[in-house]
Image (spheres, grey):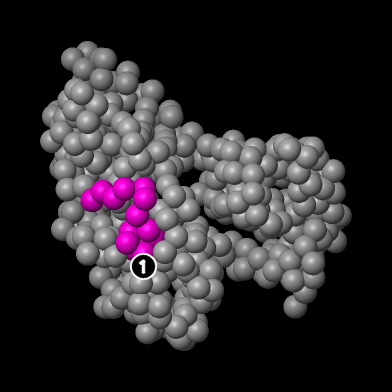
Amino acid sequence: MFFPYIKDIASTEITTLSINHTIGEAIQTMIKSDHRSIVIIDGHFNHILLAQDILTLNSDELDLDLPISEAVIHRLPKINQEKNILDAIHYLQEPIEYIATTDDEGNLVGLLSHSDLINSTDPEILMESYTIGDVVKSQKNDIWVKSTDSTEFVLKKMKQSDKDCATVIEDGIPVGVFTIKDVLRLYRDHNDIQLPISNYMTQPVEVLTASSSVKQAIEFIKSKPFKRLIVVNLEQQMIGMILQKELISLAYNNWSSIMKQHQQELFEINHLLSEQADRYKHLAAFDPLTKLYNRYKFIELYATESLAMQQRQHAMSIIMIDIDYFKKINDEYGHNTGDDVLRITAETLKKPIRNVDIVCRWGGEEFIVLLPTVDEQQAMLIAEKLRLAIEQETFPQGLRVTASLGVCEAQDDEGLEEVVSRADYALYQAKKQGRNRSVLFKQ
């Protein structure tokens, strides 16, 4: 089997800007170059500014004259362009989807992305019988909105969920998408975010049916400049999305299977693949910062626990937790302190709960706790224990950290999306009532 060199698959079309340029210039450059990222040159270091990071700066009036240094920029890992593609796989554990490729002198010569990895994958080695519907059928964490929803509402949902795309749905059918590119144009043109999202969404929507094979999905995404596929059933109703990284995972697992059939001849490569597979499994289940389960693993665990609770006719509840004024902590004390706060909060949340309870990092400064066999009244007592534990915890630099919590009990046959929506509403009420409190969702 042929494993290409990094130099054969990395993109050499790099858009760069000095760190002294403004956010407005960065947005304009992204739109002009049709790139979702820009390499930021800062002396001997290379960073990357992602279009998604522009969204985190969203406010009532985004100041386009702010320097790029005010945005969240990420240090780029490096790999020599003469390395093999297998040497790059462990970089998939990094939260950034880009790797700087360098020559022997360490000079930047290209960028390696998930897209490049997808485009280097031979579709013939993929499982033709494995359908896209099998991948997305349990995933309910993408953002679905209506065409009449305000743009401000959609931006808020994208920001809260840490997503760079929302799908506009009417009667279950996708009629438009609102991506980070649309967000950039929105900011550049100073458009009115009170208007319905239908004014700014991209349409029509290109979709793939759930019965399509992984091979067909790979070929489709190769032919389109997409980071994700929208998957529909035969009635054209949306089922969900599949990301490039999920396709990479499927392709990589199949590589491992093929290598095992040639164990004698390719023992060293097979050993490397086995090690990387273990790392990737861990990456797929755990948040690297807090060591808690991540959102994808929580979705899987919720489905299992929900079925078990229904069969045994037991109650089940969830608690949504959001650290109060977390952005202020990052702004005043720096992101390293912010990361410390997240790690300590994660450890604090694990102490008062039972072994059967499940706690995960939902995204950003949000956490979620699943409580099997617990009704809403019991869940409120647990929520208060968690809130007090956080309030009384010792944090760096003498910080006093508090959290707001939303509690709700899952109903029979209710999907995770609906439960989270109700818990999120209770969390919103907790913040509205002054923060540092627990609120139970009430009909």
Give the tally of numbered discs: 1
The front one of 54 and 225 is: 54
Question: Residue at horizontal 73%, vertical 62%?
Answer: 406
Q: Position of residue 326 (x, y in %)?
A: 65, 53
In the image, residue 429 above or below residue 42 = below
Pointer 1: residues within 10 angstroms few (<14), some, or many (20+)? many
Could you tell whether 165 is left or right of 99 in the image?
A: right
Q: Which residue is mark 1?
A: 184
Q: Residue 28's image quarter?
A: bottom left
Would residue 21 be counted in the magenta stretch?
A: yes
**What amino acid does circle 1 point to?**
Leu
Question: Residue at horizontal 19%, vertical 36%?
Answer: 109
In the image, residue 203 above or below residue 184 = below
Residue 56 in view in this figure: yes
Could you tell whether 240 is left or right of 335 in the image?
A: left
Q: Position of residue 305 (x, y in %)?
A: 64, 51
The front one of 94 and 209 is: 94
In the image, residue 262 above or below residue 294 = above
Secondary structure, mark 1, is helix
Q: Position of residue 166 (x, y in %)?
A: 42, 69
Could you tell whether 256 is left or right of 122 in the image?
A: right
Question: Residue at horizontal 28%, vertical 29%?
Answer: 79
- Quadrant location, the C terminus: bottom right
Question: Residue at horizontal 66%, vertical 66%?
Answer: 424
- Quadrant location, the N terminus: top left
Would residue 253 be counted in the magenta stretch?
A: no
Residue 314 in view in this figure: no
Instruction: Please give the range of residues in magenta.
Output: 15-27
